[in-house]
Amino acid sequence: MGIIRSCFSLIAGTVFGVYLAQNYQVPNLKKLADTAMLQAKQVEERYRKSKKKGRDNDDNYD
């Protein structure tokens, strides 16, 4: 009885998720995450500071 009680929320969530996926248009989260990562990379490249020529390390002020 203990294993059924401890796994009830997992089983109920799985059944509910299957029901939603079959009966409603659930967006593809992997595709959505890939699109978000692509946009984040584009923003990073656009606003990245450029390296100064002739200096290997900005912390070294010899």
Image (cartoon, helix red, strand yellow):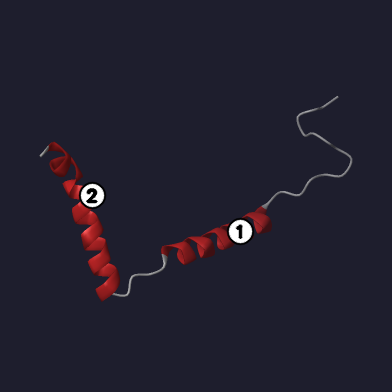
Q: Earlier in the sequence, mark 1 or mark 2?
A: 2
Residue drawn at the location 41% of the way across and 68% of the way down: 28
**Residue 23 at what x, y percent from top left?**
25, 75
Name the kind of residue labelled 2 in the image.
Leu
Furthest toward the right, the residue is 54
Disc tally is: 2
Q: Above or below — where is 26 with respect to 5?
A: below
| Secondary structure under the numbered disc 2 in the rendered image | helix
Q: CA distance from mark 1 to mark 2?
A: 38 Å
Residue drawn at the location 89% of the way across and 40% of the way down: 54
Furthest toward the left, the residue is 1
Label 1: how many residues lie within 10 Å, few (<14), some (14-19) or many (20+)? few
Residue on which the image places disc 1: 43
**Residue 44 at what x, y percent from top left?**
63, 54
Q: Is residue 17 left or right of residue 44?
A: left
Label 2: how many residues lie within 10 Å, few (<14), some (14-19) or many (20+)? few
Residue drawn at the location 79% of the way across and 34% of the way down: 57
Q: Is residue 48 left or right of residue 6?
A: right
Give residue 22's quadrant in the image: bottom left
Q: Is residue 20 left or right of residue 39?
A: left
Residue drawn at the location 80% of the way across and 27% of the way down: 60
Asked if the residue under mark 2 is in contact with the one under mark 1, i.e. CB atoms within 8 Å, the reply is: no
Q: Nearer the viewer, residue 53 or 34?
A: 34
**Residue 19 at what x, y percent from top left?**
23, 68
Residue on which the image places disc 2: 10
**Residue 26 at what x, y percent from top left?**
33, 70
